Image: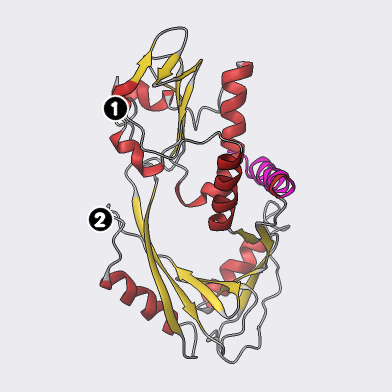
Amino acid sequence: MESKRTIRTSLSFLSFVRKKLNHKFFHEIPLYRRLNSIEEQNNWHVATDKSNLQNYLNSKLEELNNPELFAPFKFGKVNQTGYCDTQLLKQLYLAYLNQNQILQNKSFDYNQLQITKEQVTYQDIKAKKIIFAEGFGVQKNPFFNNLPLDGTKGELLLIESSELQISQIINSSIFILPIGKNKYKVGATYNWKDKTTNTTKEAREELETNLKELIKCEYRIIEHYAGVRPTVRDRKPLVGKHYLYGNIYIINGLGTRGVMFAPFLAHQLYNYIENNIPLDKEIDIQRIYKKIL
């Protein structure tokens, strides 16, 4: 996928949703990458000389002059960065759907889905097509559970510290994301075996160990989260039409960059369904069907 188009589409979508829901979700915040050695400093300078990265990476290394951060080899600044408050976006969008009576907030029963060439029927709903966007839950979907979506568990912490006082995203072996009122998200871990959403002592210890290598001040853990990222073996999204049923579609496998990829991929899928514009081959699930069918 072409990164500039992806970013452009995502920012345009977030701007549209902001106006529709009358609330801001995307916050522009600079990101600083902590460099851990002279070698990493040299690698950073090499990267900043590349033409496709010059708009995103500052060549001058910086010190943030924050006594609570441990960074003897300074930071490299990444431009055009920020974060989306997905929890707030989800809450307000669900409220919008409920207000307009276009949401059924209940589990989907695959056995009740009836499929013909002309339409799909689910209980009292009739439609020309259906799109499944289920994340890791697709493993229970009988139509698409043969796709290679493995899932990668991740855990993060929400901490509070009045001493830390940073207004930038700090990235190292972990990230520290300021969300206001002296609160910070810290993450994340990667576990390719555990597919549950249960928090673990091991992950918490890993996060705290990495955090204490990055900051010097005291902090308090407020919450501990866990979830499963919908990751794919070839690290490419799963988008497209079922091999047997022409009116069943999927959009999934967005991995760790779902917020950035989702609007672009949804736009591609819409054009594929409504305007018969082919999907990019690298995201089309036909690449998978060619190997397994």
Amino acid on which the number 2 mark rests in the picture = Asp
Q: Is residue 188 above or below residue 151?
A: below
Task: Name above or below for residue 28 compared with residue 163.
Answer: above
The disc placed on residue 142 is: 1
Disc 2, SS: loop
Q: Is residue 27 left or right of residue 130?
A: right
- The one of 63 and 38 positioned closer to us in this rendering: 63
Q: Secondary structure at mark 1?
A: loop
Residue 81: give x, y in percent of width and height.
66, 61
Instruction: Identify residue for label 2.
Output: 194
| The quadrant where residue 55 appears | bottom right
Residue positioned 71% across, 74% down in the render: 60
Q: Main secondary structure of the magenta part?
A: helix
- Assess disc 2: are there few (<14), some (14-19) or many (≥20) residues with their C-alpha within 10 Å of its C-alpha: few
Quick one: which residue is furthest to the left in this view?
193
The quadrant of the picture occupied by the C terminus is top left
Disc ID at residue 119: none
Q: Position of residue 231 (x, y in %)?
A: 39, 45
Q: Residue at x 46, y 38 (%)?
A: 237
Q: Mark 1 or mark 2, which has the lower sequence index? A: 1
Q: Residues within 10 Å of mark 1 (few under 14, many from 20)?
A: few
Question: Which of 109 and 217 lies nearest the eye of the viewer?
Answer: 109
Of the two numbered discs 1 and 2 in the rendering, the one whose residue sits closer to the viewer? 1
Question: What span is colored magenta in the figure?
Answer: 1-19
What residue is drawn where x is 51% and y is 27%? 281
Structural distance between the alpha carbons of marks 1 and 2: 22 Å
Residue 272 x, y percent position in the rendering: 58, 21
* Three-letter code, disc 1: Pro
